[in-house]
Image (tube, rainbow, N blue to C red):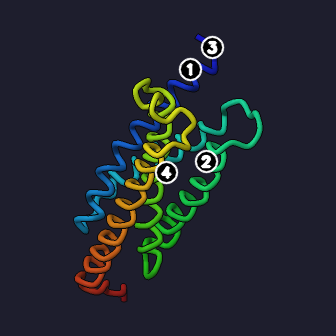
Amino acid sequence: MTALNTLTIVHTLLSLIALLLGLGVVAALVQGTERPRLVNWFLVTAVLTTLTGFFFPFNGFTPAIGVGIVSSVVLAVALFARFGKARRGGWRHADTVGLLLTEYFLVFVGIAQAFLKVPALHAIAPTGMETPFKVSQAVLLTATVIVGFLAVRRGRAVATSRPPLRSAR
């Protein structure tokens, strides 16, 4: 097995784990519940997925590199909102949106990979510019916007329903 094969397997496994953990994170966000361990594992696997994506041979700028760059920025903001600002004030929304966008990018790439690798899907959209591919991505984007709206709204309700923190005297 070559180093590239090993990298591909590790990257794919990390991507799938992050994607599955992300589904749980998104469900918790929509329910307005806190799941810090789940979120932390999601962030770890998402960061590792993004980082390992940059280890593949560089043959010029590709959509995958673009998604990796944007994902890196989104993850940096989400990490800063969560750990640097402790989700205070508007940073709560930045954290929520960052987590949702991270999952969106994982699923977006998963769909793109499915259309490349699954013969039945590849047959109906061989270049990724065909209607079935565009429709699947439009459905994902629409679902992400709806879920994002619900998550931000529920997050605001959770934040305002908590008793204020007492200051240490």
* x then y, percent, for residue 19: 39, 43
Query: Viewed as shown, does residue 52 lie left or right of 152?
Result: right
- For the residues marked 2 and 4, what is the alpha-carbon distance in whole angstroms? 9 Å
Q: Which residue has dot 3 on it?
A: 2
Q: Is residue 155 above or below residue 7?
A: below
- Residue 97 in view here: yes
* x then y, percent, for residue 24: 29, 51
Q: Which residue has dot 4 on it?
A: 105
User: For this rendering, which residue is in front, 70 or 3?
Assistant: 70
Q: Which residue has dot 2 on it?
A: 68
User: For this rendering, which residue is in front, 139 or 160?
Assistant: 139
Mark whose residue sits in front, 4 or 3: 4
Q: Who's the residue at 43% across and 72% down the image?
A: 87
Asked if marks 3 and 1 touch (Cβ < 8 Å), the reply is yes
* x then y, percent, for residue 83: 48, 64
Mark whose residue sits in front, 2 or 1: 2
SS for callout 1: helix
Identified by mark 3, the residue type is Thr
**Residue 89 appears in which quarter of the rendering?**
bottom left
Identified by mark 2, the residue type is Gly
Identified by mark 1, the residue type is Thr
- For the residues marked 3 and 2, what is the alpha-carbon distance in whole angstroms? 23 Å
Query: Viewed as shown, does residue 76 lie left or right of 136?
Result: right
Q: Which residue has dot 1 on it?
A: 6
Identified by mark 4, the residue type is Phe
Q: Is residue 114 above or below residue 149?
A: above
SS for callout 4: helix
- For the residues marked 4 and 3, what is the alpha-carbon distance in whole angstroms? 28 Å
- For the residues marked 4 and 1, what is the alpha-carbon distance in whole angstroms? 23 Å
Q: Who's the residue at 66% across and 31% down the image?
A: 56
Asked if marks 2 and 4 touch (Cβ < 8 Å), the reply is no
